[in-house]
Image (spheres, coloured by chain):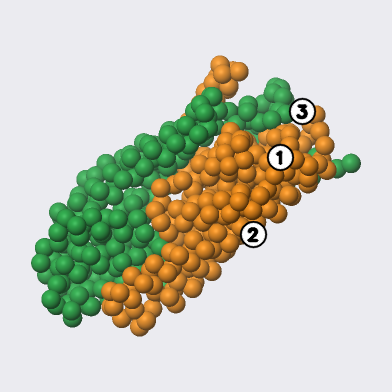
Amino acid sequence: MTGLELTPGSWILVTALGALLGLDAIAWPQTMISRPIVAGMLGGALFGAPGSGFLAGAWLELVAARHPPFGGARYPETGPAALIAGAAFALSDTRSILPLMAAVLAGWTIGWVGMHAIASLRAYNARLIGDPEVVRGDAAEIARRHRLAIRLDGLRAAALTGTLFVPAVLAVRWLETWGGDPGPASLSVGLAAVGLAALGGVAARVLGGRRQAWPAFVAGGLAGLLLAWWSA
Amino acid sequence: MTPRTSDFTAAFLRSFAVQGSWNYRTMIGGGVAYALLPLLQRIHAGNPVALKESIERHSSAFNAHPYLTPVAIGAFARMEHDGHDAATIERFRAALRGPLGALGDQAVWAGWRPFCTLGATIAFCLGLDPRLAALAFVLVYNAAHLALRVWGLRAGWAHGLDVGRVLKGSPLKAVGARLVPINEALLGTVMVLLLARAPDLVASPTLGGVVATVSLGAFFLPGRAGTVAILALFASCAVWLLP
């Protein structure tokens, strides 16, 4: 783990930011700074590599696009997950595809842990404010309990981030150290490309919902090829 | 009494926290009551019994897209102000839930939000500074977000019981319907650009063919493709670590 500089100050900063991002997605104020591209960029920027954080966030954005928050659906939490993934990738030595995949998978895992924590909090909230017998039309009581629920959500997100940040960073760096260099065009890189391609296809279908929309998806892919060639 | 501007401002600001106590029994009912409090306290000033009854009414089960909840808050306040009976308000609450949820899901969650995130990602892949790309996303996305909340509270208060007609005539549904196919195209673009930016990846006709086949396969058969995608990412790491 040479070269890793994780100070208590940076841990506190990441934890506080994780609390803010965790709050943003649902409880307050839904400005979408909790989206993976923003949270990932912030995680990378904290450790001097906003571009690496954004890249990890963009992969997680495709992962998250499979789970639109329609109705009361359960979906993986994005803010703390992408913050940690972006930071973990930024803190890797090589910033090659192995730490990128490891960071994305760490973010995916943390997102599901976050979702289960949110579900537990929602069950608790049902007792806290969802029972008319408890609230009884009391304005002050409603306000007190509602604010308490928001504070609990912030604490939940802080606990999630503070607990999982260091293990995720260490896991990504450990994998990187163990894995070595596979060289370009290896099976590993190909599998990552296949994974991204499948994520893109599923996300397009989930968002649009219609098989007939495939020409738009293909046209977008061709436009992407042109843009990639033009910007190379 | 008629609410003052400060009451509307307080309700508007509280509407950002409407999902703060989301729960499986009343969903955002508690949040709606919390946001409505400044308006209800003014409307029922001097009548604690009416205030208590209205708070009980509005803390019961309710759900809506968070950005369109100000429509409900404005309309509920107007109906309380106009003295509608409890049964009418209850029926109106039940009738408003579906449209506010469906409209917001289509226009914002499936339309505007992916449009903005994908646009920012494309800008980043084409060389825009990541901090600027993220900032542009937050600013552009929230310009519409804030406008929608302000419009909603105004429309709800102005039209009360008739707000359904305003929602029906709003361009929200059309905006969502137009953005969805654009987003599908943008997803294709982002997928290719992210591959082009992936570290260590060397483009080849074989890889291009595999990627095209897999992405179209996942598009047409999305059932388990998401799980397969995650497994492929895990396998990517596992293969790397093999001796």
Q: CA distance from mark 1 to mark 2?
A: 19 Å
* Marking on residue A163: 2
Picture colour for chain A: orange
Q: Nearer the viewer, residue B50 or B72?
A: B50
* Marking on residue A185: 3
Asked if residue A176 can be seen in this view, the reply is yes
Q: CA distance from mark 3 to mark 2?
A: 36 Å
Q: Nearer the viewer, residue A161 or B222?
A: A161
Q: Which quadrant: the C terminus of chain B?
A: top right
Q: Mark 1: which secondary structure? A: loop
Picture colour for chain B: green
What's the amino acid at mark 3?
A: Ala
Residue at the disc numbered 1: A92
Mark positioned earlier in the residue sequence (1 or 3): 1
Label 2 crowd (10 A; few <14 / some 14-19 / many >=20): few
Write the residue at 25% across / 67% down: B37
* Marking on residue A133: none
Relative side of A228 to B159, left or right: right
Residue that protrudes farthest toward the top in the picture: A230
Write the residue at 70% across / 35% down: A95
Q: Nearer the viewer, residue A47 or A186?
A: A47
Relative side of B51 to A42, left or right: left
